[in-house]
Amino acid sequence: MAKIDGRKARITNWRNWYDCFGECAQKLGYPDAVKSRRTRRDPVNDEIVTLLACDEVGGLSGAIWAVEATDGERYLIGQRGLEILPLTTEQLIEAKRKSIATLSEELATLEAQLAEEKRANQPKVGDYARVTDIGHRSADVSLGVVVRVDSIVNGSRPYKVSKLFGSIDEWDYVANVERLTPDEARAALIAEVDSLFR
C-alpha cells in the first residue's frame, strides 16, 4: 500500500484536476484517481481533501497530488489548484506519534536482522577462527592467531580452541574469536607461515 501524506488541503481551483494521467496515478500508488468522469462526480472548489501522495515532476500546474475526498473519491489535482492547510497541534502530535511508531517498527526489524546476522556469523565447532580476545594470560594462544574451534561452553572464556600449529593445551580457552571462511583461514595461515621465513 502507498504511503499516505495525511495532511489536509482545500481545493481552490478544481480545473487543475487531471483525469487522464494514468501513469502518474499508477506511480503514486492510486490508479483509481483517474477513473472516468462518467462514473463519478467532479471535485468542487472549497472541498477539503486529504493529501495522499505527490509527484514532484508534475504537470502544467506544478506538482501533482493524489487526494482523497471525504466520500472516498480520489483525484489527481495540480499543486496550483490546492491550498495545503496548516496542521493543528492535535494533528502534529498524531503525526509525530505515527512517525515514532513507524521508526519503532523499523528499529525492531533492523534489530532482528542484526541479531540474525550475528547468530549466522557466530563461530561453530569445527570452524576456523582468529582469536580476538584471550580473556586470560596464555602462553599457547595469542591475539590474531588462527585456530580451530573445538568446543563451546558457558562462561567468560567459552571457546576451547586448538592452534593449527603446535600442541593442544587444556587452557586454550579464549573469550572471543572471529569466524573465518576456509579461504580466509588459508590466506591467514599462509601469511603466518611466510612470516616464519622473514
Image (tube, grey):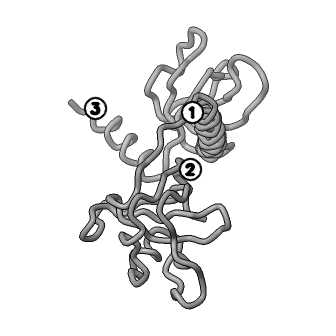
Q: Which sits earlier in the primary sequence, circle 1 or circle 3? A: 1
**Location of residue 115 in the rendering, given as x and y in whole percent from the top left corner:** 65, 40
- 27 left or right, relative to 38: left
Instruction: Identify the mark at residue 6; answer none if there is no mark.
Output: 2
Disc 1 versus disc 2: nearer the observer = 1
- Amino acid carrying label 1: it is Thr
- Amino acid carrying label 3: it is Ser
Q: Residue furthest front?
A: 45
Q: Secondary structure at mark 1?
A: loop
Residue ID for mark 1? 88
Q: Residue placed at 52% from the left, 51% from the top?
A: 5
**Location of residue 135 in the rendering, given as x and y in whole percent from the top left corner:** 60, 13
**Location of residue 20 in the rendering, given as x and y in whole percent from the top left corner:** 40, 84
Q: Residue placed at 66% from the left, 38% from the top?
A: 101
Q: Which sits earlier in the primary sequence, circle 1 or circle 2? A: 2
Q: Residue placed at 39% from the left, 76% from the top?
A: 18
Instruction: Identify the mark at residue 195; answer none if there is no mark.
Output: 3
Disc 2 versus disc 3: nearer the observer = 2
For the N terminus, which image quadrant?
bottom right
- Amino acid carrying label 2: it is Gly
Residue 160 appears in view: yes
Q: Which sits earlier in the primary sequence, circle 2 or circle 3? A: 2
CA separation in Å, label 1 and label 3: 70 Å
Q: Secondary structure at mark 2?
A: loop
Q: Nearer the viewer, residue 110 or 114?
A: 110
